[in-house]
Image (tube, rainbow, N blue to C red):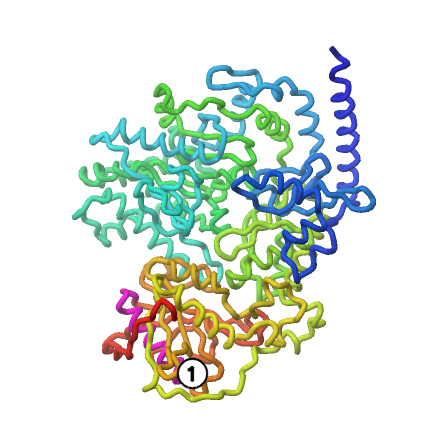
C-alpha cells in the first residue's frame, strides 16, 4: 500500500525543503513585499486591477462568488508564505509568488510567523490526529488530554479550571451561561439576572455575545437580552483629571446597578457611593501594590488584608442591597478593547472595579479572546493591572487556535450540570497540535522588544504626519493609531493595500498594527516605510514634492456672487426620514464649499477615482447618511426661498455616536447630553456667509435644545470663535489642530453650553418642511 502514498510523501519532502528555504530567506532579511505595480493605479478600483493583474486570485474568487462573505480581494497561498509575508496564488515573471506584508497577524490569531518550522514538524509528527477529527466530548485522545495538562501551566491566577470549546464567541457564551447558572443556583429568587458590560465592547456575534456587545451597528437589530452597559473610561494621558472623572462616572454607573438590581425606586445615594469609593481609594493607597496573592485561596500577607477589607465592607451592606446585587450575574470586560479601537483603561480603574465587584459578590469576567497569551507583553493582559484579587472567569481564543474558558473553583461547580455546557468537538485536533507546538516558544521579552520597535516607528510617523495620524497607543504588539477623521480611515487602508501592506481597521477611525511576536526588524521597518508612503499617497504629496508651501495650500475661497437677506431664507429640518430627498442638495453645498479634486489645487490630479471626488475636508455622503441614521440625530438646512436652493446645512447626533478627533476628551462624553456637530457648510458664493452661518447655528441650537441636548461640541474652523453667534463665542477650546488634514486651515475642538445659565431660549427661526424631492 506504500506506493499509494508515494506522491504524498514526495510532496511533504518538497514542502519541508521549501519551508527551510523560505525561513532562511526571511530570517536573513532577503524577502520583501512584491505586488503588481499596477495596483498603484489610483484611477481604477482594486477589484478591477486584481482581475487584470492577479488573474489566478480573481478566478478563485469568482469560483467562490456564491459565498456570502469576502474581505481582501486576493487568494492567499499558505504553502509559499513565511513569517508575516503572505504569498498569493499569482506569480510574476520569475515564477515567484507575489507577497503581501501582514501587520494584522491574521486578525490577531497568529503569535508567530507562517510556516514556522516548529509547527510544520509538529503537524507532520501528529498526522493521526489530523486525519480524524475526534468528538472530544465523549472520545478523549492523548492529544486532547496533553493539552488540558498543558493548560494547567498557563491558567490565569484564580481561574485554574478550564473548558475547551471551538471559538471565542463560544467561550464567551459559556462564560455567560456559567455566571447565569451561578445566580440561578444561589440567589433567593432563582433568577439568572443580567450581565453588565461596557460601551465599545465586542464579545462576538452569537446572540448571547451580542447581548454584551455595545458597539454601533454590531447588533444590527437582532433580538437579544436587554442587558445594561456602562461607559468604558478610556485613559487619556493628556487629560489625567478627565480620565479620573470618567472612571468615577463609570464606577457610579456600575454601583447604581449593583445597589438597585435595576429595580425601580431603589435608593442610589451619591453620598453612600462616595463613602464606599473613598474607602476603596484609601485601602488601595495604603496597601502595597506588588504581588498580591489570590484571595480565593485564603492566602496570607497582602491577600489576607484584601480579604479582610472585602469582608468588612460587605458587612456594612444592608440585606436588601445584598439581595438586589444578586440580580447582577457578572461584570464582563475586555482588558483592552481590540475591535473597539485598542482602547485602554488605567490600572487604577481596574483595581477599583475588581474590589467593587468583590464587595458585592459579583463575578468579574475578563474577555481575553484577543489579548490572551502574551500579546500585551504579559501572559494575560489583565496582569497589567496588578489586581488586588483574581478574576472569576477568563476567556481565550484566537492564538489558542480553539476557544478556552478558565474559571474559578467556585464557578467550576456549575459545569457539572449534565449537558448544559457540553460541546461535540471540545476543540479541534489540528488547532491543538499548533498550540502545543508553540507553548514553549513564548518569550515575553521578545514580544516587548518587537512592540517597542514597532511603536517607536509609528510614533515617528505620527510626528511626521501629524495632520492625519495621531494617538499611537497600545501594549506589547497590540498597537494602533488614529486617523484624524473617520472617513479617511478606509482610504488609508486602501492606499496601504495597493502597496502590499495589510492593516486592520478598528472602531471608527483606528488602524491596528499587530506584528507577530517574532517579527524580524527588517519586516517591521518595511511595514512602517510602506505605511509612510501610503499616507503620502493619500494626499499625493509625492507628486507635489511635499514642500511646505504646497502642503499649506488652503481650500480656495471663491469670490462671493450673491448676498442673501435673512428675511428671504428659512430653516428646514433634516431628518432620517427626509434625508434621501435632501442629500443631493446637501452634497452640492458640501462640494461647492470645500471643493473637489478637480477644483482644488491642494489635491493632486493623480489621486485615485474613489478619493478625487472630494477634498480632505469634504465629507462623503455615506458618512452623513450614517450620522443621520443615528438615534437623536439633529439636522438643519438653510433654504433660499427665492431660488429654492439649500445655501447651508449642519448635521450631528449624540457625541457617543462619534469617534472624531477630540471626542473622547470631551468633558461630557458619556453623559448623553451633548450634540456633536459633525458637518456644516455654507455655499462659498454667498457674500454674507457669516450671517447665514450664524442663522444656521442658531437654528441648530434651537433643535438641539428641543431634542434634550444641553451642550454642543464640534471640530470646526477656528475662525468661527470670532465670527459665530454670541453664545457660540463662549465655547471652550479643548484642542487646536494646525494645518488640519494638510489643508492649511486651523481647526479647533470646541465645547459650549447650548443654554447658558440665566439665558432665555433662542428665538425660533422660520421653519419649513422639506419635500421628499428636495
The reply to whether residue 773 is visible in this rendering is yes
Give the residue drawn at x 52%, y 22%. Answer: 148
Relative placement, left or right, of 66 versus 525 is: left
Mark 1 lies on residue: 722
- Indicate whether residue 128 is drawn in magenta: no
Say what secondary structure mark 1 lies in. Answer: helix
Residue at far left of view: 265
Give the residue drawn at x 56%, y 57%. Answer: 490
Q: Nearer the viewer, residue 520 or 276?
A: 520
Residue 584 falls in image quadrant? bottom left
Residue 771 falls in image quadrant? bottom left
Give the residue drawn at x 83%, y 44%. Answer: 94
- Indicate whether residue 693 is drawn in magenta: yes
Q: Nearer the viewer, residue 30 or 608?
A: 608
Label 1 neighbourhood size at 10 Å, few (<14), some (14-19), many (20+)?
few
* Rendered view: 531 above or below 202: below
Residue at far right of view: 94
Residue 31 falls in image quadrant? top right
The reply to whether residue 284 is visible in this rendering is no
Relative placement, left or right, of 528 versus 296 is: right
Q: Main secondary structure of the magenta part?
A: helix
Q: Which residues are magenta?
A: 689-709
Residue 139: percent from the left, percent from the top? Answer: 50, 15
Residue 467: percent from the left, percent from the top? Answer: 58, 68
* Rendered view: 562 above or below 534: below
Residue at far front of view: 773
If the image is split into quadrants, where does the N terminus sit?
top right
Amino acid at each position: 500500500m506504500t506506493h499509494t502514498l508515494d506522491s504524498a510523501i514526495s510532496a511533504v519532502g518538497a514542502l519541508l525543503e521549501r519551508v527551510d528555504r523560505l525561513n532562511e530567506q526571511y530570517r536573513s532579511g532577503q524577502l520583501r513585499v512584491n505586488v503588481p505595480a499596477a495596483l498603484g493605479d489610483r484611477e481604477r478600483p482594486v477589484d478591477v486591477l486584481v482581475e487584470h493583474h492577479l488573474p489566478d486570485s480573481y478566478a478563485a474568487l469568482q469560483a467562490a462568488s456564491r459565498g456570502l462573505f469576502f474581505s481582501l480581494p486576493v487568494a492567499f497561498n499558505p504553502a509559499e508564505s513565511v513569517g508575516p509575508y503572505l504569498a498569493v496564488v499569482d506569480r510574476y515573471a520569475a515564477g515567484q509568488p507575489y507577497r503581501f506584508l501582514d501587520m494584522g497577524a491574521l486578525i490577531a490569531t497568529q503569535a508567530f510567523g507562517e510556516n514556522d518550522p516548529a509547527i510544520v514538524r509538529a503537524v507532520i509528527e501528529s498526522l493521526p490526529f489530523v486525519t480524524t477529527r475526534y468528538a472530544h466530548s465523549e472520545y478523549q485522545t492523548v492529544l486532547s488530554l496533553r493539552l488540558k495538562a498543558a493548560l494547567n501551566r498557563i491558567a490565569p491566577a484564580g481561574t485554574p479550571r478550564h473548558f475547551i470549546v471551538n471559538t471565542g464567541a463560544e467561550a464567551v457564551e459559556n462564560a455567560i451561561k456559567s455566571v447565569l447558572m451561578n445566580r440561578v443556583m444561589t440567589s433567593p429568587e432563582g433568577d439568572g439576572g443580567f450581565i453588565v458590560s461596557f460601551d465599545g465592547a465586542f464579545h462576538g456575534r452569537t446572540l448571547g455575545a451580542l447581548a454584551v456587545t455595545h458597539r454601533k451597528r454590531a447588533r444590527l437589530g437582532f433580538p437579544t437580552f436587554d442587558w445594561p452597559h456602562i461607559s468604558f473610561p478610556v485613559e487619556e494621558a493628556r487629560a489625567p483629571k478627565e480620565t479620573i472623572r470618567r472612571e468615577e462616572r463609570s464606577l457610579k454607573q456600575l454601583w447604581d446597578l449593583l445597589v438597585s438590581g435595576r429595580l425601580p425606586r431603589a435608593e442610589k445615594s451619591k453620598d453612600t457611593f462616595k463613602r464606599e469609593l473613598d474607602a476603596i481609594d484609601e485601602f488601595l493607597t495604603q496597601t502595597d501594590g506588588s504581588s498580591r496573592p489570590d484571595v480565593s485561596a485564603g492566602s496570607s500577607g497582602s491577600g489576607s488584608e484584601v480579604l479582610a477589607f472585602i469582608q468588612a465592607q460587605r458587612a456594612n451592606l444592608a440585606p436588601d442591597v445584598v439581595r438586589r446585587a444578586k440580580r447582577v450575574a457578572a461584570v464582563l470586560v475586555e482588558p483592552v478593547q481590540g475591535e473597539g479601537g485598542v482602547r485602554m483603561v488605567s490600572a487604577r480603574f481596574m483595581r477599583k472595579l475588581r474590589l467593587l465587584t468583590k464587595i458585592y459578590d459579583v463575578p468579574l469576567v475578563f474577555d481575553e479572546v484577543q489579548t490572551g497569551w502574551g500579546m500585551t507583553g504579559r501572559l494575560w493582559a489583565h496582569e497589567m493591572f496588578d489586581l488586588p484579587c483574581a478574576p472569576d472567569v477568563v476567556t481565550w481564543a484566537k492564538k489558542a487556535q480553539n476557544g478556552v474558558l478558565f474559571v474559578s473553583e467556585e464557578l467550576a461547580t456549575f459545569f457539572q450540570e449534565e449537558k448544559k455546557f457540553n460541546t461535540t468537538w471540545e476543540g479541534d485536533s489540528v488547532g491543538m497540535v499548533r498550540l502545543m507546538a508553540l507553548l514553549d516558544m513564548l518569550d515575553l521579552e521578545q514580544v516587548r522588544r518587537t512592540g517597542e520597535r514597532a511603536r517607536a516607528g509609528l510614533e515617528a510617523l505620527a510626528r511626521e504626519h501629524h495632520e492625519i495620524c495621531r494617538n499611537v497607543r497600545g501594549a506589547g504588539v497590540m498597537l494602533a493609531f488614529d486617523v484624524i477623521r473617520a472617513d479617511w480611515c478606509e482610504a488609508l487602508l486602501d492606499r496601504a493595500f495597493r502597496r502590499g501592506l495589510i492593516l486592520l481597521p478598528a472602531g471608527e477611525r483606528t488602524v491596528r498594527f499587530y506584528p507577530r511576536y517574532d517579527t524580524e526588524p527588517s519586516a517591521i521597518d518595511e511595514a512602517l516605510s510602506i505605511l509612510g508612503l501610503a499616507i503620502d499617497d493619500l494626499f499625493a504629496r509625492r507628486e507635489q514634492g511635499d514642500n511646505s508651501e504646497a502642503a499649506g495650500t488652503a481650500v480656495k475661497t471663491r469670490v462671493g456672487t450673491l448676498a442673501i437677506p435673512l428675511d428671504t431664507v428659512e430653516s428646514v429640518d433634516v431628518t432620517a426620514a427626509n434625508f434621501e430627498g435632501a442629500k443631493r442638495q446637501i452634497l452640492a453645498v458640501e462640494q461647492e464649499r470645500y471643493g473637489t479634486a478637480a477644483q482644488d489645487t491642494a489635491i493632486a490630479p493623480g489621486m485615485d477615482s474613489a478619493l478625487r471626488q472630494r477634498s480632505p475636508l469634504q465629507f462623503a455622503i455615506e458618512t452623513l447618511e450614517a450620522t443621520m441614521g443615528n438615534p437623536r440625530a439633529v439636522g438643519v438646512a438653510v433654504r433660499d426661498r427665492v431660488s429654492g436652493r439649500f445655501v447651508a446645512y449642519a448635521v450631528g447626533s449624540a457625541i457617543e455616536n462619534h469617534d472624531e478627533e477630540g471626542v473622547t476628551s470631551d468633558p461630557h462624553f458619556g453623559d448623553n447630553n451633548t450634540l456633536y456637530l459633525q458637518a456644516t457648510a455654507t455655499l462659498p458664493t454667498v457674500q454674507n456667509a457669516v450671517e447665514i452661518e450664524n442663522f444656521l447655528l442658531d437654528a441648530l441650537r434651537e433643535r438641539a435644545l428641543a431634542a434634550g441636548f444641553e451642550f454642543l461640541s464640534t471640530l470646526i474652523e477656528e475662525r468661527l470663535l470670532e465670527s459665530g453667534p454670541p453664545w457660540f463665542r463662549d465655547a471652550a477650546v479643548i484642542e487646536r489642530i494646525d494645518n488640519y488634514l494638510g489643508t492649511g486651515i486651523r481647526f479647533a475642538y470646541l465645547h459650549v453650553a447650548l443654554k447658558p445659565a440665566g439665558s432665555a431660549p433662542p428665538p425660533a427661526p422660520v421653519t419649513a418642511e422639506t419635500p421628499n424631492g428636495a
